[in-house]
Image (cartoon, helix red, strand yellow):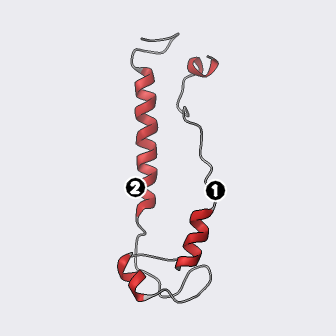
């Protein structure tokens, strides 16, 4: 069912686009890329060998990674691609 000037299936297209964007963001964040560092990029403490082997491309020590993971992440709203019509309702 279309509302206003939106074509049929517009709501489903918006939902699919939002899901695709979120999956792409998660995949990009999933694994570090490149060679692991022997010392943390933030605090310069040595990164244990076991961590470098377990996570190829790791750049941070465990403590710095925990601090980074604890930071709040601000993202856009759910309906970022919504048409003007859907935002006015």
- On screen, 60 above or below 89? below
Q: Which mark is residue 88?
A: none
Q: Secondary structure at mark 2?
A: helix
Tell me the crowding category of disc 2: few under 14, some 14 to 19, or many 20 or more residues within 10 angstroms, Cα based.
Answer: few
- On screen, 61 above or below 26? below
The structure residue drawn at horizontal position 59% and vertical position 37%, both measured from the top left corner, is 77
Q: Quadrant of residue 35?
A: bottom left
Q: Quadrant of residue 56?
A: bottom left
The quadrant in which the C terminus is found is top right
Residue closest to the eye, 6 or 61: 61
Tell me the crowding category of disc 1: few under 14, some 14 to 19, or many 20 or more residues within 10 angstroms, Cα based.
Answer: few
The structure residue drawn at horizontal position 52% and vertical position 77%, both measured from the top left corner, is 62
The quadrant in which the N terminus is found is top left
Q: Residue 49: x, y in percent?
A: 41, 88
Q: Residue 16: x, y in percent?
A: 40, 33
Is 63 displayed left or right of 51 in the figure?
Answer: right
Please tell me whether mark 1 or mark 2 is closer to you in this view.
1
Alpha carbons under labels 1 and 2: distance apart: 19 Å
- On screen, 73 above or below 38? above
Q: Sequence-wise, which precedes: disc 1 or disc 2?
A: 2
The structure residue drawn at horizontal position 45% and vertical position 87%, both measured from the top left corner, is 48
Q: Residue 26: x, y in percent?
A: 44, 53
Q: Which mark is residue 27?
A: 2
Q: Residue 23: x, y in percent?
A: 41, 47
Q: Which mark is residue 72?
A: 1
Q: Secondary structure at mark 1?
A: loop
Q: Quadrant of residue 27?
A: bottom left
The structure residue drawn at horizontal position 61% and vertical position 22%, both measured from the top left corner, is 87
């Amino acid at each position: 069912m279309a509302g206003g000037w939106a074509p049929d299936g517009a709501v489903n297209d918006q939902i699919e686009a939002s899901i695709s964007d979120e999956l792409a963001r998660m995949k990009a964040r999933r694994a570090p890329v490149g060679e692991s560092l022997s010392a943390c990029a933030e605090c310069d403490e040595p990164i244990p060998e076991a961590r470098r082997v377990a996570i190829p491309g790791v750049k941070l020590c465990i403590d710095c990674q925990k601090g980074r993971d604890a930071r709040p992440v601000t993202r856009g709203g759910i309906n970022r691609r919504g048409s003007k019509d859907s935002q006015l309702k």
